[in-house]
Amino acid sequence: MTLCIVWRDGSNIKFASDSRLSLGSLTSDCGIKVVRIPFNIYGPEEPGGTKPLISSGDLGMAFAGNAVGALMVKEALAEVIFCMQVVPTFPDSDDKGMDSIADFVFRAYEVISKNLCATILEQGRTCIVFGGHCVIQNKLRAFRIETDDQNQRHKREILTGNTDVEIFGSGDDAAHKLMPSGATERDSIDVLQRVINDSSVPTVGGNIQYGSFAGSKFQPAGIAKLGDRDEFGHREVHYWRGPMDLNGSDFDQSGGLVPNFPMIDFIR
């Protein structure tokens, strides 16, 4: 399962989650739950067969639900969102704004979710929060889509207030109890870490993941943390992106390619 916290920080929208996946009664801290999904919107085909690109950007997304269902929904959405087109009979409409993008994502989600739930029942239930820059309203907007216990699917806009916070996943009750009113970014991160550390919430765990927007571009990030002290009292610096330590021995080499992934600093 999961704990995801998404909040509006003025004009920005920021995402954070744990890394734990649930596979039936088993868990693994290898999930990538805060992701960047690029999108492109093309206009109607012009003489010569070209389709002009009229809008592009990124959606930031976070997922909660059974690992199989969440993975299938994420992968399928990434494929179809990458290439969308305005209906030819309405080329001058507002179909390049976030309302139309959210409607498109929801229709794709409905198809995928219905098929998953028909096959793997409640394990196909997935909650998704996504956000992106709306060229019509010239601001970042966010939406939540999910399947309820009656197998009905819903979409609603969220984070319309400047300090709104959206919490979802199996650890949401624990997080709500800890979250102060008027929470800052640090509050949200600290609450997430406290639930991860709480053994009474076994479906939440692993390393924190983070992402925020720079204009219309979404940038996921890992976290920089100090490890435990070794026998000599030394502590190594770890750069965690989910289960991967990008500053660890697996990526420590003198030649070839090395990671250049942004991090938020948990050391200071």
Image (cartoon, rainbow, N blue to C red):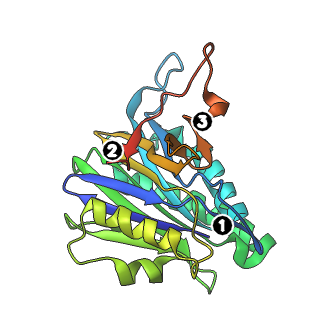
Which residue shows up at 69% across the image and 63% down it?
67
Q: Where does residue 215 sit, x and y in percent of width and height?
A: 28, 39
**What residue does disc 3 label?**
248
Q: Where does residue 91 sit, x and y in percent of width and height?
A: 37, 39
Neighbours of disc 1 within 10 Å: few (<14), some (14-19), many (20+): many
Task: Report the side of 253 relative to 177 (left or right).
Answer: right
Q: Which mark is residue 113?
A: 1
Q: Residue furthest bottom?
A: 150
Q: Would you place residue 185 above or below residue 137 in this image?
A: below
Disc 1/disc 3 C-alpha distance (Å) = 38 Å
Give the quadrant of residue 177.
bottom left
Q: Where does residue 37 sit, x and y in percent of width and height?
A: 50, 43
Quarter of the picture holding the N terminus: bottom right
Which residue shows up at 38% across the image and 50% down it?
266
Considering only order in the chain, which callout, 1 or 2, is on the residue closer to the N terminus? Answer: 1
Neighbours of disc 2 within 10 Å: few (<14), some (14-19), many (20+): many
Q: Residue furthest top?
A: 255
Residue type beneath disc 1? Ser
**Whether residue 30 can be seen here:** yes
Badge 2 marks a residue whose secondary structure is strand
Which residue shows up at 48% across the image and 39% down it?
38
Q: Would you place residue 245 above or below residue 139 in this image?
A: above
Please give the count of numbered marks on the rendered protein.
Answer: 3
Q: Are marks 2 and 1 in contact (CB under 8 Å)?
A: no
Residue type beneath disc 3? Gly
